[in-house]
Image (tube, helix red, strand yellow):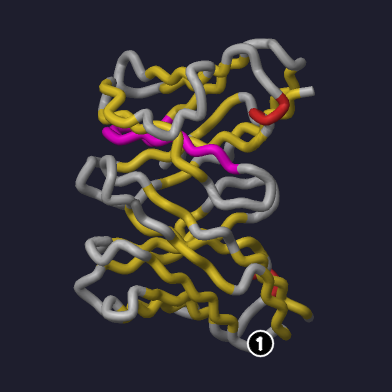
Amino acid sequence: GENVEQHPSTLSVQEGDSAVIKCTYSDSASNYFPWYKQELGKGPQLIIDIRSNVGEKKDQRIAVTLNKTAKHFSLHITETQPEDSAVYFCAAPSPQGAQKLVFGQGTRLTINP
Amino acid sequence: GAGVSQSPRYKVAKRGQDVALRCDPISGHVSLFWYQQALGQGPEFLTYFQNEAQLDKSGLPSDRFFAERPEGSVSTLKIQRTQKEDSAVYLCASSLTPDRETQYFGPGTRLLVL
């Protein structure tokens, strides 16, 4: 089945700097890669996703890049703000079973003012 | 519009008790998923419904876990004879159709088994 590895597990950056979180996946047939943000006591919130027919997608300060050959995808947050502090999860669809997602282990991002 | 809602938000149970967790998906969403999230971990798949049909229950950890969605909308996850290792956040997610991958999550139910 699909295996998703996420790095780093924790990341601390100064406000205004950029943050990058990386994920690798194992199943070359995977074609959809979402990123979720989870704040304390809340459910995961979809912040951006990318499908395998594009290499990059951007939404304001957030971007995701995909390298299908290397089977990895990354989340980029620019001009970080204190409200970006949260746990971020990448995911990929499992080939076994309809549309269920396999999640990475999460990255706790802390923005220092 | 309204998102996915779950109730209760918090549940404390004594070991051996049965619990029932409710999920109200986004109106009109065909697909419904249950995930279990242990402290400090990513969500892990439990089970999947397409309308009222439970098409995948491969993630349910034991036969003490049971889920249903009898009318294809609201779903209930039931855990019988709860054990301490069942303590986790239980997340529900829904998506518009089986072909639309985007899953929207509810706030979760935090279950603590004493």
Q: Give the residue number, with chain letter if any, for mark 1.
A: A16
Residue B50 in the image, given as x and y percentages of width and height:
26, 30
Residue at x-position 70% and y-position 82%: A13
Residue A19 is left or right of residue B57, and the answer is right
Residue A3 is left or right of residue B55, and the answer is right
Disc 1: which chain? A
Q: Quadrant of residue B8?
A: top right
Residue A22 is left or right of residue B94, and the answer is right
Residue at x-position 72% and y-position 72%: A110
Residue A57 in the image, given as x and y percentages of width and height:
34, 77
Q: Quadrant of residue A64?
A: bottom left
Q: Is residue A75 above or below residue B110?
A: below
> For the magenta stretch, what is the residue range?
B25-37
Residue at x-position 42% and y-position 52%: A102
Q: Quadrant of the C terminus of chain A?
A: bottom right
Secondary structure, mark 1, is: loop
Asked if residue A78 is among those painted magenta in the image, a careful observer would answer no
Asked if residue B27 is among those painted magenta in the image, a careful observer would answer yes
Residue B47 versus residue B63: which sits nearer the camera? B63
Residue A80 in the image, given as x and y percentages of width and height:
62, 80
Q: Is residue A62 above or below residue A16?
A: above
- Three-letter code, disc 1: Gly
Residue A35 versus residue A27: which sits nearer the camera? A27
Q: Which class describes the residues within 10 Å of circle 1: few (<14), some (14-19), or many (20+)?
A: some
Q: Is residue B34 visible?
A: yes
Residue A87 in the image, given as x and y percentages of width and height:
62, 61
